[in-house]
Image (cartoon, rainbow, N blue to C red):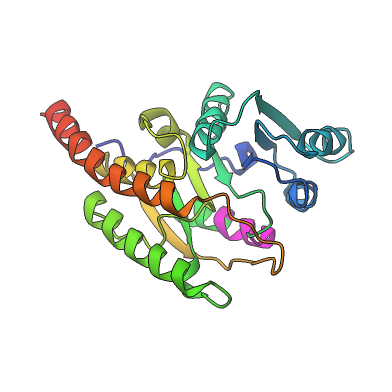
């Protein structure tokens, strides 16, 4: 079993990881709000074609912001951006990362709740669940999130409230151990499935989601990403077979 570490949490060695693609409207504000925690902020610019690179350069030059920018020359998908961040975090011996989205949908004030959960329970993964406060969430998104969370929880053999949530804490040992094979929005549920099989400790905490009315535009493609989700389900069967064979 590869579960809970006995090492006492080193909060100062947690970084905030933000995958970003064409987020010129919100990225600088998100970074500035994150800077109050005095933690390293890692932004993976996933081939943005708007003013995101310029804004990241401006933010990096500001005092009091510990910003590290990693760049993909071309857009590769959210999963690849996360993997780039995970590799960097492992190479630089971070205790863990708190992942948030770059579009301003997450309340930066709630990062302190993740830190508190790490200090109290020392989990391997914390998932921020939007199901405790669904006010403002479009009904179709609520229904899809509920269904996908139920399916992934069944596959993972572990109750996970909100598998599509991008607001998480992920410890070093998870990033180092779990081998990710997907590259887009299916990467987040893939990590939960495989981490659960490895016996890592996963907890859920409530979060709220901020919908920027009139300007919110999801990068999720309903058709393509729904197809990828069902492909993920079938892939998980092969992963489970390989996993069980490896641990015999």
Res 154 → quadrant: bottom left
- Which residue lies most toward the bottom here? 135
Q: Position of residue 33 (x, y in %)?
A: 77, 53
* Residue closest to the eye, 91 or 42: 42
Image quadrant where one finds the C terminus: top left
Q: Which residues are magenta?
A: 106-115
Residue 4, visible in the rendered structure: no
Residue 195 within the magenta-colored segment of the rendering? no
Q: Residue at x 55, y 21 (%)?
A: 91
Q: Residue at x 46, y 45 (%)?
A: 185
Residue 110 within the magenta-colored segment of the rendering? yes
Q: Residue at x 52, y 75 (%)?
A: 133
Position above or below: 182 against 151: above
User: In this image, 30 relative to 19: left or right?
Assistant: right
Image quadrant where one finds the N terminus: top left
Q: Position of residue 105 (x, y in %)?
A: 64, 60
Q: Position of residue 111 (x, y in %)?
A: 62, 56
Res 11 → quadrant: top right
């Amino acid at each position: 079993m590869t579960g809970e570490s006995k090492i006492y949490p080193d909060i100062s060695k947690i970084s905030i990881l933000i995958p970003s693609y064409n987020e010129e409207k919100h990225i600088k504000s998100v970074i500035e709000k994150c800077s109050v925690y005095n933690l390293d902020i890692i932004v993976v610019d996933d081939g943005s074609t708007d003013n995101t690179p310029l804004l990241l350069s401006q933010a990096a030059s500001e005092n009091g912001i510990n910003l590290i920018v990693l760049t993909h020359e071309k857009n590769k998908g959210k999963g690849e951006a996360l993997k780039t961040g995970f590799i960097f975090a492992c190479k630089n011996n971070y205790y863990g990362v708190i992942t948030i989205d770059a579009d301003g949908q997450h309340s930066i004030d709630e990062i302190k709740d993740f830190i508190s959960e790490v200090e109290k329970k020392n989990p391997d993964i914390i998932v921020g669940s939007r199901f405790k406060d669904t006010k403002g969430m479009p009904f179709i998104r609520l229904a899809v999130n509920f269904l996908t969370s139920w399916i992934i929880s069944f596959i993972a053999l572990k109750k996970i409230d909100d598998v599509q949530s991008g607001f998480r804490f992920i410890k070093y040992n998870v990033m180092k151990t779990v081998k990710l094979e997907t590259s887009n929005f299916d990467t987040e549920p893939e990590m939960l499935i495989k981490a659960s099989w490895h016996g890592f400790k996963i907890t859920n905490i409530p979060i709220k989601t901020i919908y920027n009315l009139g300007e919110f535009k999801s990068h999720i493609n309903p058709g393509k990403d729904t197809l990828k989700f069902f492909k993920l389900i079938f892939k998980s069967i092969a992963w489970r077979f390989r996993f069980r064979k490896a641990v015999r």
